Amino acid sequence: MSCLKDKFDRYLNDVALSEGGQAPAEPVPAGVDLEAFAALRKTYPANMASSLVLPLLQLMQQAKGHLTESDAVFVADYLGVPAMQAVEALSWYTMLYREPVGRQVVKVCRNIACSLMGAERLIAHLEKKLGIKAGETTPDGRYTLLLVECLASCGTAPAMQVNDTYHECLTEEKIDRILEELP
């Protein structure tokens, strides 16, 4: 089994080098599926490696649950792009988590439109209902409550996102129903 993995690793390195990239200097992080990385890479033109930073970080996060700076460096090495490009993506996007999160990630918009429509009141309601402050995870690992700068839903403010689902025109009652329906 180890020999097959070694051959596969050499193959991936050869592919990366032949496509203008470089062999990853970082060891492969636990849970990362290099076959999935290679399959995704094949869907992009060789000269567009930098466009793969975000999709590969998302793929890695799906496998690991959250990302570290060394994960970003691994992605950069794999693609042959500057490490700063992947580290910046990790720090910029609120959809990428730098620490473990709960099974249900609740992101509440706090930008001007949502604030004018009562976001602070809804955040206080969520903190009380979940028993945590923004930025925390419940002790049972079910919920993480995050504040985000904008969910681009200004016309239907206030808004929140639970995992990949948007919820708009929120009230305390609507939030309670949403939370009750979550698995």
Image (tube, grey):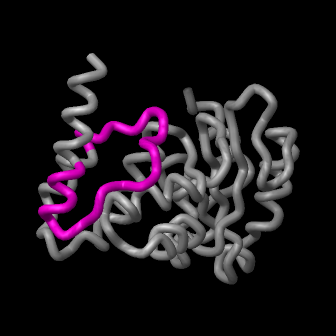
Is residue 104 or residue 64 the one in the foreground? Answer: 64
**Where residue 17 sits: x, y (%)?**
19, 61
Q: Which residue occupies 64% across, 31% down? A: 180
Q: Main secondary structure of the magenta part?
A: loop
Query: Which of the image's four quarters has the C terminus?
Result: top right
144 in magenta: no
Query: Which of the image's four quarters has the N terminus?
Result: top left
Q: In the image, is 32 to the left or to the right of 30?
A: left
27 in magenta: yes
Q: Which residue occupies 32% across, 68% down? A: 80
Is residue 73 or residue 145 the one in the foreground? Answer: 73
**Where residue 56 sits: x, y (%)?**
35, 55
Is residue 139 or residue 153 the one in the foreground? Answer: 139
Q: In the image, is 125 to the left or to the right of 40?
A: right
In this view, 165 is above or below 35: below
In this view, 3 is above or below 85: above
Residue furthest to the top in view is: 1
**Where residue 46 sits: x, y (%)?**
14, 69
Q: In the image, is 12 to the left or to the right of 165?
A: left
Extent of the magenta region: 13-36
Please tell me how many numbered marks the rendered image carries: 0
Q: Which residue occupies 52% across, 59% down? A: 95
**Where residue 123 sits: x, y (%)?**
79, 58
Q: Which residue occupies 24% across, 23% down? A: 3
